[in-house]
Amino acid sequence: MTITNDHPAPMPALYLGHGAPPLVDDPVWPGELTAWAARLPRPSSILVVSAHWESAPLTIGATRPAPLVYDFSGFAAKYYQVRYDAPGAPDLAARVRALMPDDEPVAEAPGRGLDHGAYVPLTVMYPAADIPVLQISMPSQDPERLLRLGRRLAPLREEGVLIIGSGFMTHGLPYITSWEPNAPPPRWSAEFDAWAAEVLTAGDVDALLNFRHRAPAVRYAHPTVDHFTPLFITLGAAHDAAAAPAFTVEGYFLGLSKRSFQVA
C-alpha cells in the first residue's frame, strides 16, 4: 500500500462510539454505522486511536496482519472468534513517524493487533476488511496534547486516510442500573450528552478542553476519561476545530450516549 496525494478530496475525521462486541447484534446501531460508511469516500487507509490503548510514548501497532486483541471478558465465546484480517499499513506508519516532531518520540509494538475499539466498528463499517488499518496508542489523556497530536496527523486526510478517534460519548459503566439495550438514559448521561452536543455545535473548544470542570455530571459520565479524550484527536485533525461537526449517530445504548460525528 502506498500513500498518495491524489485523493479527490480530504477525508473527514471521525469520532465514533465503538461499542462492545455485542454491537454487531444490535438491531439498529450496525445499520447506522453501515450507512455512515457508505456516505464516506473510500479511504486509502484507516488510522485509529482507541480508548483501549493508552501507552506513552506514542506507539505504532502492528504494520502487518496480527491477531486481534480481545480486551474484554464475560462475553459469549463467539466474540472471541471474530476475525478482521485487514491489510497492514507500513507506509502509513512511516508517514506517522515523519509527521511527529523531535519532542514526540515514537515507539513500536509490532505484535500489537487491533483492539475492540478499532475492529468492532470496522467489522460493521468495512466488513470486507480490504482497507489497510493502523492503530496507534493514545500517549496521554491531556486534551491539549491530544489536540496537537490530531493537528500533526491532519495532513494524512489529504492523502485519503480516514482518521478515527474511537471512544464513547458517555461511559459511566459503574453507574448503569439496567443492562437492557434500550434502557432510558440516566439523568447524568443525558445531561452530559446534551452539553457535549451544545458545545460542539457552538465550536466552544475551550469548554471541551476544560470538560473536567465545565461539563455537567462528568464524574458519572466519565469516571475515567479515556472514552472521551479520543475526541480531541478528531478535533485536532479538523480543518477548523471550532467548526460545527455533523452528528451521524445519536441516541443511547444501555443508557450511554452513542453520539458520533465527523468533521471536515
Image (spheres, rainbow, N blue to C red):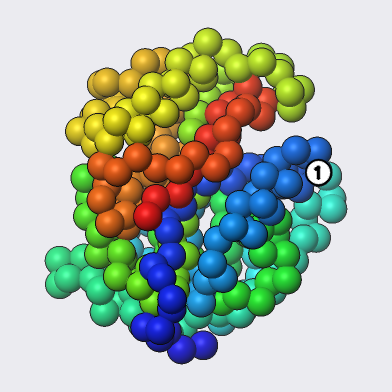
On the picture, is 250 further left or further right than 160?
right
User: What's the residue at 15%, 66% (across, down)?
Assistant: 103
Image quadrant where residue 249 sits: top right
**Front-most of residues 246 and 120:** 246
Q: Is residue 3 above or below residue 224?
A: below
Residue 51 in view (yes/no):
no
User: What's the residue at 41%, 15% (across, down)?
Assistant: 217
On the picture, is 75 further left or further right than 35?
right
Residue position for label 1 = 25
Image quadrant where residue 224 sits: top left
Q: Is residue 205 above or below residue 123?
A: above
- Residue 68 point in image, percent of width and height: 65, 64
Q: Residues within 10 Å of mark 1 (few under 14, many from 20)?
A: few
**Front-most of residues 232 and 172:** 232
User: What's the residue at 25%, 74% (across, down)?
Assistant: 99
User: What's the residue at 41%, 70% (across, down)?
Assistant: 9
Outermost residue, front side: 8
For the image shown, how many numbered marks are present on the structure? 1
- Residue 106 point in image, percent of width and height: 29, 71
Outermost residue, top side: 187
On the picture, is 10 further left or further right than 179?
left
Outermost residue, bottom side: 2
- Label 1: element kind: helix
Which amino acid, by three-letter code, is at mark 1? Asp
Image quarter of the C terminus: bottom left
- Residue 26 point in image, percent of width and height: 78, 39
Q: Is residue 146 above or below residue 191?
A: below
On the picture, is 245 further left or further right than 125?
left
Image quadrant where residue 142 sits: top left
Residue 98 in view (yes/no):
yes
